């Protein structure tokens, strides 16, 4: 089964950032634990196009937009995730 959606988009964006030297930490295929700047995180979050698919509500979309808008470019953010 191939999964896609916002979590997968962010996972692969963080993985790409680590591989390209834009995040520091560990990225081991299915697990990622990295620290990146807000500028990099904002770029990754901008790739999330929608929460369609029946698993999320309009409130989820609003919460995500509020979080994305709160990210500060010069701040550091930790991204820890597992892909299954």
Image (cartoon, rainbow, N blue to C red):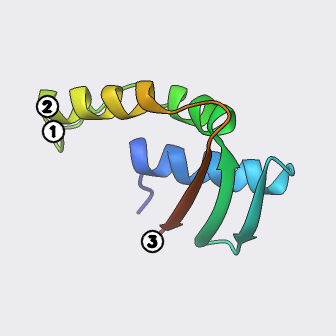
What whole-number distance in Å separates the C-alpha atoms at marks 1 and 2? 13 Å
**What is the secondary structure assignment of the residue under circle 1?**
loop
Q: Which of 3 and 7 is in front in this view?
A: 7
Q: Which of marks 3 and 1 is nearer the N terminus?
A: 1
**What is the secondary structure assignment of the residue under circle 2?**
helix
Residue holding disc 1: 54
Q: Can residue 73 be seen in this view?
A: yes
**Residue beneath the point at 74% across and 68% down:** 25
Q: Which residue lies furthest to the right in this view?
A: 21
Residue holding disc 2: 59
Classed neighbour count for the residue bearing mark 2: other residues with Cα under 10 Å, few (<14), some (14–19), many (≥20)? few
Q: Which of marks 1 and 2 is nearer the N terminus?
A: 1
42 over 16 or under it: above or below: above
Classed neighbour count for the residue bearing mark 3: other residues with Cα under 10 Å, few (<14), some (14–19), many (≥20)? few
Q: Which of marks 3 and 2 is in front?
A: 2
Q: Which of marks 1 and 2 is in front?
A: 2
In the displayed structure image, the side of residue 55 where residue 74 appears, left or right:
right
**Residue beneath the point at 54% across and 29% down:** 47
**What is the secondary structure assignment of the residue under circle 3?**
loop
Q: Is residue 4 visible?
A: no
Residue holding disc 3: 84
């Amino acid at each position: 089964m191939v999964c896609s959606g916002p979590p997968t988009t962010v996972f692969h964006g963080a993985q790409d950032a680590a591989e390209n030297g834009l995040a520091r930490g560990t990225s081991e295929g299915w697990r990622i634990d990295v620290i990146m700047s807000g500028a990099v995180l904002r770029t990754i979050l901008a790739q999330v196009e929608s929460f369609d698919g029946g698993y999320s509500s309009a409130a989820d979309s609003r919460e995500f937009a509020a979080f994305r808008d709160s990210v500060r470019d010069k701040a550091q953010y930790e991204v820890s995730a597992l892909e299954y």
